[in-house]
Image (cartoon, rainbow, N blue to C red):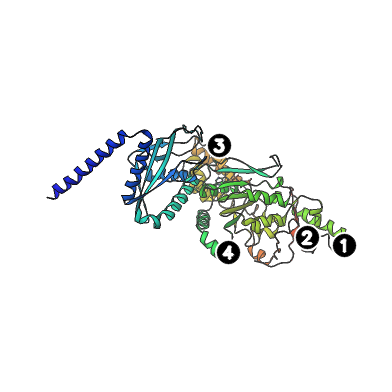
Amino acid sequence: MQGAGSMEFWTFWAAMLGVLGFFRNILSKEYGNTFDSWLHRALTYFSPYAFVDIPEFEGAGGNEIYEFVQSYLSSSTASDAQHVNLCRPKNASQNTFSPAPLETVEDTFTGTKVWWKRSVYIRQSTGIQFSDVPNDEKRKYTLKIRKKDRDRLLEPYVQHVVDAAKSIKERSRDRLLYTNIKGSNYFRKKSWEAVPFKHPSTFDTLAMDPELKEDIKNDLLEFTQGKEFYQRAGKPWKRGYLLYGPPGTGKSSMIAAIANFLQYDIYDMELTEVTSNSELRQLLIQTTNRSVVVIEDIDCSADLAERAKARKESDKKNPETGLGRGRSDQDEGSRVTLSGLLNFTDGLWSCCGSERIIIFTTNHVEKLDKALLRAGRMDRHILMSWCEYPAFRTLAANNLGLEWHDLFPEIENAIAGKAISPADVSELLLKKKRNPTAALEGLLEVLGKAPLSEEKPVMKIDLDELQLTEAIAIDDDAADEPTSSADSSAVESRIEPSHANGEPKTDGGTEN
Ligand SMILES: Nc1ncnc2c1ncn2[C@@H]1O[C@H](COP(=O)(O)OP(=O)(O)OP(=O)(O)O)[C@@H](O)[C@H]1O
C-alpha cells in the first residue's frame, strides 16, 4: 500500500511539472522570466534551506566576500570535491583548487553542515566591463544552509570563512623584503621599496647551539600565539631581539630564519638614510603587521661619541643654566636621536601595529648605549658566537651533506675554544665540497692555526651591570620637542653613521 501511495505522489509531481513546463513554453520571453522567478521563490519558500548568493561583482565593483570564499574553498574542502578546477596563478608558488561550476561542496562548522555551490551563467550585457571576465559571464557562490541554523550560524560562519581565507592568503603569498629609500616619491615622503624575499636560511640550516635554537623557536611561537596574553597584560604585541657577536656568526642568517619561520615580511631599516625622528616615525607607521623590522649594525648607525660631543658643545653655549643641553641635535635640525630610536622600540609609536618583531644587530655590543640594552627594551639579547662543534655538525650537513665522518672526533677536539666564525668554517668546507675528506682535512689545518677564543673574547652583555644602569625617562614627544631640562642631554643623543668610540651615559628616570 505504501508503494502505491508513493507512486501516486510521484505521478502527481510529474504531472505538475508537465503542466508547469507546458505553461512555461507557451509564455512569451518577458512573462517566462517572471514565471521563473515566481517558481524559484515558491520553491525556496517551501524548502527547508536558505540560500545566500555571493556574486563576484556587486554594482560597479568587485565583491570582497566572493574572493574570501574563493580562497577558503581553495583549501582542502574544495580539493575533496569530486570535480575541481585546478590552477596556479602567475608567479604564485602554490596550486589552488576551486569547485567546478555546479559542483556542491560540503563544509562543517561547529558540527553543522553547510553547502557551497559555484555557478557561472550568462547575463544580459550592460555594455560595462568590470574586469577581464567576459562581459556576459556572471559568477557567484551560493551558500546553502538550513533555515533553522541560519540566524545562529550565518554571521559566525561568514566570519570564520573570512578569517580562514585571510590566513590562507597570508601563507601562500610571496613574502617581501622592504628597504627604506630616500624620499623617492613625488612628495619626497619617506617610504619603503620592496623586493621578493627568498632567503634560504631556516632554523634547520642555522649553525648554533641546539638548545639556544630551540629556545628561540619556542619564544617566537609563544609570541605569535600570545595575542590574548599581550591584550590581557596591556602590552603592545611586539618583541625585541638584540643579536650580537663577531662578524660572520650568523646574525643576518638568523633574521632570515626568523622571517621564514614566522612567514613575516622584513623591513630592513637603513638608519643612515633617515634624517629625523619624524621620518623614523613615518617609516614605522608604514610597516605592516606580522613583520620583522630590522636595524643592522646599530653600533655603526648610532654614534654615541657624537652624543657626548653634542652635549659638551651645548653645555658650552649655556654654561650656567645648562638650557642648551641636548638642544644642539635639534638646532642643527633633522637627526635621529637616541630617544627617537627608543620610541621606535618601546614608545607610543612602536604600538601603531601589532605582531611585530624588532631586531637590532651589532658586532660591538660594548659600543651601544646602555639605554638600548636595558631590560625590557630588547626582550632577548642573543649572543651569536664562534663556531662550536654542534654548529660545525650543522655546517657539515649543509655544505657537504655529511651526517658523520671519521674525522669528526678530531674536529671536535680541534674546534673547542677556537675563535673561528661559522662563516669561515662554511667557506672552508664549500671550497672542497666535492671531496668531503679533503674539506675536513683543510678545516683541521686551519683550526690548528686559529686563535683561541680567549684571545678574541666576545663581549657578553652583563645583565647585572645593566640592572644598575639608570633608565632614561622617555616621553613620546621628547624626540622632536626637546625639553630644557638637564635630562634632555641623555634623551637627545644623536645617531649618525660613524664608528667612533663613545662614552654612553644615562641620566635620571627609573628602571623598568
Ligand atoms: N650560524 C650560522 N649558520 C649557518 N650559516 C652561517 C652562520 N653564520 C654564518 N653563516 C654563513 O656565513 C654567511 C655570512 O653570515 P651572516 O651574514 O649571517 O653573518 P653576520 O653575523 O650577519 O655577519 P656580519 O656581522 O658581518 O653582518 C652566511 O651567508 C652563511 O652562509
Q: Amino acid at mark 4?
A: Gly
Q: Nearer the viewer, mark 4 or mark 1?
A: 4
The residue where tag 1 is placed is: 319
Q: Is residue 151 visible?
A: yes
Question: Residue furthest toward the left?
Answer: 1
Asked if disc 4 and disc 1 are in contact, CB closer than 8 Å, the reply is no
The residue where tag 4 is placed is: 234
| Ligand 1 within 8 Å of the CB at mark 4 | no
Which mark, by number, is residue 489? 2
Distance from disc 2 to disc 3, alpha carbons, whole Å, reads 51 Å
Q: Residues within 10 Å of mark 3 (few under 14, many from 20)?
A: some
Q: Amino acid at mark 1?
A: Pro
Q: Position of residue 428 (x, y in %)?
A: 56, 40
Distance from disc 4 to disc 1, alpha carbons, whole Å, reads 43 Å
N-terminal of the pair, mark 3 or mark 4, is 4
N-terminal of the pair, mark 2 or mark 3, is 3
